[in-house]
């Protein structure tokens, strides 16, 4: 497709340096699809790029279009693309993997060491159009609206975390009720958990956790979680802990309220060291599992099923702005004034 499009780029290294510009509509390779973007959700990664912290500065080489959580309509496809049609509604798996290394061949594409990331190591989706490999475009036959469809990338990461362990009939503590944590609570409920205890110090985020299905909310600043979590679970420690906070202190504290043979899945990120007493961890038979991205593409299919069953993500979106107001969207995410803000090209 010929012509130009509006997009938001990181124009140069350093804090700020984000600009709304016009660029040529990207070309479509033989295995690619061109997508007209209908909605783009602001992510913490976009804030990292704006602030130019070490996470962003070691991964991005400006100038580059930012943004990776999006939905849109296929308007052009390469000559070798057969399973996707013009007019299909899609979201996208943002990790573009090599499919040739040992890790990929063993079915672990989600941790491929050669991964390229949309909106970070290649041009992203805060634009009117984006071109991506067809295998990364996930078709949705039914969906609530374009805004909720743009939440799929973080939602499917929450699916990965909350389905890592069997939750049927299990008691679960969820640490952190930000956007992914709140969606994780919704998944946990639909995955059959018997009781969900949300742990979150920010009242507005805690309320989102309750809105998405938590049975009880605990403020870890005002309460000793070692006592409060079992008290909220009928006097029993919990079977599973899901961390969406990246707070190493909170993860360490979970060892005080998890049962022997308990399972801990961690999606939250931190550069700090996690420390615990090894013999206690070993003798209690605990499991600690890191959650990276989304299992490709099993978690996407599970997520589709949960949405078809009725899981509602509408409480997650609190703000909707035109793309031209991207600075406000980033500010809302940085300050925590939104749960999720979506930008419309």
Image: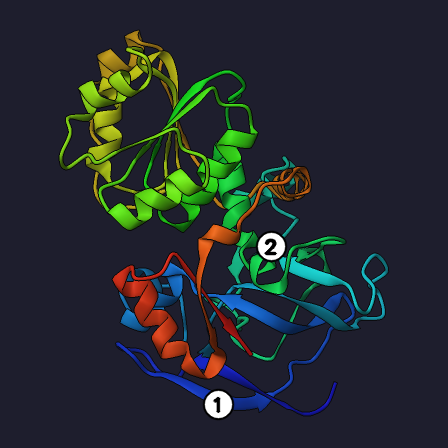
Left or right, 188 with respect to 132, comes to: left
Residue 312 pos. (x, y %): 56, 46
Residue 188 placement (x, y as % from top left): 49, 31
User: Split into 4 quadrants, where in the image is the N terminus?
Assistant: bottom right
Work out whether residue 190 or residue 150 is closer to the camera in this orientation and state it.
190
Which quadrant does the C terminus fall into? bottom right
The residue nearer to you, when weighing 289 against 336, is 336
Residue located farthest toward the top when viewing the structure as drawn: 283
User: Which residue matches tag 2?
Assistant: 93
Residue at image coords 51%, 22%: 167
The colouring scheme, among rainbow, by chain, secondary structure or one colour, is rainbow
User: What residue is shown at x 29% (from left), y 50% (from top)?
Assistant: 204
User: Is the residue marked by circle 2 packed among few (<14), some (14-19), or many (20+) residues within 10 Å?
Assistant: many
Which quadrant would residue 197 be assigned to in this image? top left
Q: Quadrant of residue 149?
A: bottom right
> Could you tell me which residue is drawn at 50 percent across and 24 percent down?
165
Placement of 339 over or under 184, stated as above or below: below
- Residue 16 visible within the image: yes
CA separation in Å, label 1 and label 2: 25 Å
- The quarter holding residue 278 reads top left
The residue pinned by badge 1 equals 21
Residue 114 at least partly seen: no
The answer to whether 179 appears left or right of 336 in the picture is right
Q: Picture coordinates of residue 322 (x, y %)?
A: 49, 79
């Amino acid at each position: 497709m010929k012509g130009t499009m509006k997009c938001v780029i990181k124009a140069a290294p350093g804090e700020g340096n984000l600009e709304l510009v016009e660029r040529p509509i990207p070309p479509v390779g033989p295995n690619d699809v061109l997508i007209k973007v209908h909605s783009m959700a602001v992510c913490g990664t976009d804030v990292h790029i704006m602030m130019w912290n070490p996470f962003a500065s070691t991964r991005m080489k400006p100038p580059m279009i930012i943004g990776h959580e999006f939905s849109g309509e296929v308007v052009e496809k390469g000559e070798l693309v057969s399973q996707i049609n013009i007019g299909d509604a899609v979201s996208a798996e943002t990790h573009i993997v090599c499919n040739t290394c040992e890790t990929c061949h063993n079915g672990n594409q989600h941790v491929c060491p050669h991964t390229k990331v949309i909106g970070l190591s290649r041009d992203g989706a805060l634009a009117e159009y984006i071109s991506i490999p067809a295998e990364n475009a996930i078709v949705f036959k039914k969906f609530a609206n374009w805004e909720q469809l743009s939440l799929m990338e973080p939602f499917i990461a929450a699916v990965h975390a909350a389905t890592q362990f069997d939750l049927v009939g299990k008691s679960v503590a969820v640490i952190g009720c930000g956007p992914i944590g709140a969606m994780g609570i919704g998944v946990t409920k639909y995955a059959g958990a018997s009781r969900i205890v949300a742990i979150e110090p920010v009242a507005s985020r805690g309320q989102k956790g309750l809105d998405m299905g938590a049975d009880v909310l605990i403020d870890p600043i005002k309460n000793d979680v070692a006592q409060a979590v079992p008290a909220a679970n009928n006097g029993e420690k919990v079977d599973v802990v899901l961390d969406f906070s990246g707070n190493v202190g909170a993860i360490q504290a979970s060892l005080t309220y998890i049962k022997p043979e308990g399972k801990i899945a961690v999606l939250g990120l931190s550069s700090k060291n996690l420390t615990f007493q090894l013999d206690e961890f070993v003798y209690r038979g605990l499991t600690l599992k890191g959650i990276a991205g989304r299992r490709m593409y099993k978690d996407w299919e599970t997520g589709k099923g949960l949405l078809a069953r009725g899981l509602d993500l509408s409480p997650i979106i609190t703000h909707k702005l035109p793309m031209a107001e991207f600075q406000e969207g980033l500010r809302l995410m940085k300050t925590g004034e939104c749960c999720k803000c979506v930008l419309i090209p």
